[in-house]
């Protein structure tokens, strides 16, 4: 797949206001209709309130977002030491016409710059149906590290 380069894309962090809330909810409704993630449902206000919000714009048009919650890594055995400040990335969404242009990677890079000194890690999980593409994106493009996976297999009824 050829990676087109997005032009005139700017990134910014924002607080939650009615205009941003309306746009994020509309994007999430669009995402839900794409049916690309297991169990995804459109957001409501309470899903977004209290989150760090990073936006991508081309000109004056919002074309994507990344949001998440800052927290301390729970006291459990994990790759990340207990009580380490993290941003748990809850959603990353780019409008379909703007995908594969480096905008998602740009949002991650921008968020890292804004969060430097506040959190030590970006952490996420995904329920995408296109796991090969998403693993390529997060592992190869964004340079994240693999932590764990949940896999499943339905037992055939005819055994």
Image: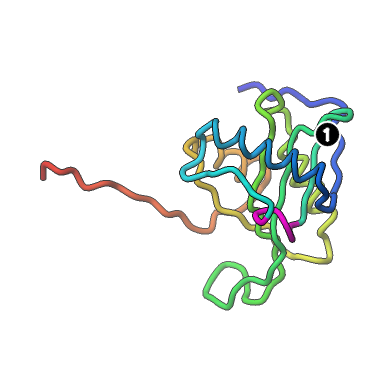
At a point 15% along the width and 43% down the height, the residue shown is 157
Image coords of residue 153 (percent x, y): 29, 47
Q: Quadrant of residue 95?
A: top right
Looking at the rendering, the stretch of residues picked out in magenta corresponds to 46-51
Residue found 54% across the figure and 48% down from its top:
126
> Residue at left 54%, top 32%?
33
Image position, residue 63 (x, y; %) = 76, 32
The residue carrying mark 1 is: 57
User: Residue 50, located in which quarter of the rendered image?
Assistant: bottom right
Query: Above or below — where is 125 with respect to 25?
Result: below
- Does the stretch in magenta take in 78? no
Whether residue 155 sits left or right of residue 43 in the image: it is left
Q: Where is residue 43 shown, x and y percent of the image?
A: 62, 47
SS assignment at label 1: strand
Quadrant of the image occupied by residue 29: top right
Left or right for 77, reference 13? left
Determine if the magenta segment contains residue 49. Answer: yes
x, y (%) of residue 123? 63, 58
- Where's the C terminus, which quadrant? top left
Asked whether 158 or 46 is in front, the reply is 46
């Amino acid at each position: 797949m050829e990676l087109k380069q997005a032009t005139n894309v700017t990134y910014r962090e924002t607080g939650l206001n009615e205009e941003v809330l309306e746009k994020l909810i509309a994007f999430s409704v669009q995402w839900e209709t794409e049916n690309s993630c297991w169990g995804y449902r459109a957001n409501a206000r309470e899903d977004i309130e209290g989150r760090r919000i990073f936006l991508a714009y081309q000109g004056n048009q919002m074309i994507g977002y990344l949001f998440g919650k800052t927290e301390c890594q729970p006291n459990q055995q994990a790759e990340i030491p207990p009580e380490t400040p993290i941003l748990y990335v809850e959603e990353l969404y780019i409008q379909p016409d703007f995908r594969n242009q480096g905008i998602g990677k740009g949002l991650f890079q921008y968020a890292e710059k804004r969060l430097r000194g506040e959190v030590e890690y970006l952490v996420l999980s995904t329920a995408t149906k296109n796991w090969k593409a998403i693993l390529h994106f997060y592992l190869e493009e964004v340079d994240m590290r693999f932590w764990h996976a949940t896999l499943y297999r339905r037992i055939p009824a005819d055994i």
